[in-house]
Amino acid sequence: MKTKFNIPKTFFGFLTASIFFWLLINLSKEYDTTIVYDVEYTQLPQQKTLIETPINNLSLKLKSSGYNLLVASITHKPIKLNLDKASRKTGTSYYFLSKDLISEVQEQLKSSIELIEIKEDTIPLKIGTLSSKKVPLKSNLNISFQLGYDLSKPVIIVPDSVLISGDETYVAKTGFLNLESITLENLSKSTTISSPIIFPENVQLKSSHSTAEINIDVDKFTEGEIEVPVFVKNAPKGINVFPKKVKIIYKVGLQNFNEVTPDLFKVECDYLQSKNKDINYLTPKIKDLPDMVTLVRIVPNKIDFLIYE
């Protein structure tokens, strides 16, 4: 047989009231405790920049009533430190001494809270001279294509460069910025992708952009051939070459196939090279070709010549 206990409702009322008064009495007493505050750095002098990220919080030993300390631990605002008041040690090294910050920090606390101590003795800073310049962006692509497909033109990055600003030392030695690595497999159509810009770690560099778009133009490719006249550089009088034209065999995207014409190519031989090497033929080389073609080869790869006196 189970026994039932009937607790009067008045008991719970007295219990709640007792806890409330106990909390009220204890929260009204004075305590000292340590609360961690976020730090916000302000008033950076003109033409100056933070080189490295300084400490982002301070441990403050405070004294007040339990209630005030409880509220402060939940709702406190960041402590603002005026960088214009930082002391210079040497070069780019600056610092705050905690003992010199007591009055400044106390002013930012509620009047009912007393600041006893800042636990950190010193707040080190790195402040440099502000500089800026434009640097190019470089993509980092790993692309594989479906059989018969390839890039129809070079990859385009938009923007192709960004304006960076920061400490003059870091800015001067930054020649370019990389984009994050991207892998694309079995590609058969054009695509545009967004890639974050990679910035150096632990360095305060600002940029006009944080990402860039990469335009990848893909097309189905076919082989084409075209006849182009041969030009002879440093040719003596009376030289005659055979053949006078060569075939250029190339790979081109279908959408550009009809755009390829002989005037877009230039094939040249250097007579002096053959003479210096004591060989009886000329070697044709492509000097100009359109961006739309790849895998170019020349047929034939030797040009005969005769010199008539």
Image: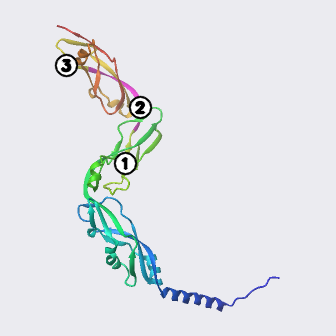
Q: Disc count in the image?
A: 3
Q: What span is in magenta?
A: 218-229
Callout 3 amino acid: Asn
Label 2 to label 3: alpha-carbon separation: 37 Å
Q: Nearer the viewer, residue 234 or 63?
A: 63
**Residue at image x 39%, y 85%?**
112
Q: Nearer the viewer, residue 147 or 95?
A: 95
Image quarter of residue 247: top left
Magenta span: predominant SS is: strand
- Is 182 in the magenta? no
Residue 277 visible at all:
yes
| Coloring basis for residues | rainbow
Percent x, y for residue 168?
26, 54
Q: Nearer the viewer, mark 1 or mark 2?
A: 1
Element under disc 1:
strand
View extreme (right): residue: 1
Q: Does residue 21 sit above or below 129 in this rendering?
A: below
Q: Nearer the viewer, mark 2 or mark 3?
A: 3
Q: Does residue 26 sit above or below 155 in this rendering?
A: below
Label 3 to label 1: alpha-carbon separation: 47 Å
Image quarter of residue 149: top left
Percent x, y for residue 32?
45, 81
Where does label 2 land, which residue?
Answer: 221
Where does label 1 land, which residue?
Answer: 213
- Tell me, for residue 234, which label it has, or none: 3
Label 1 to label 2: alpha-carbon separation: 25 Å
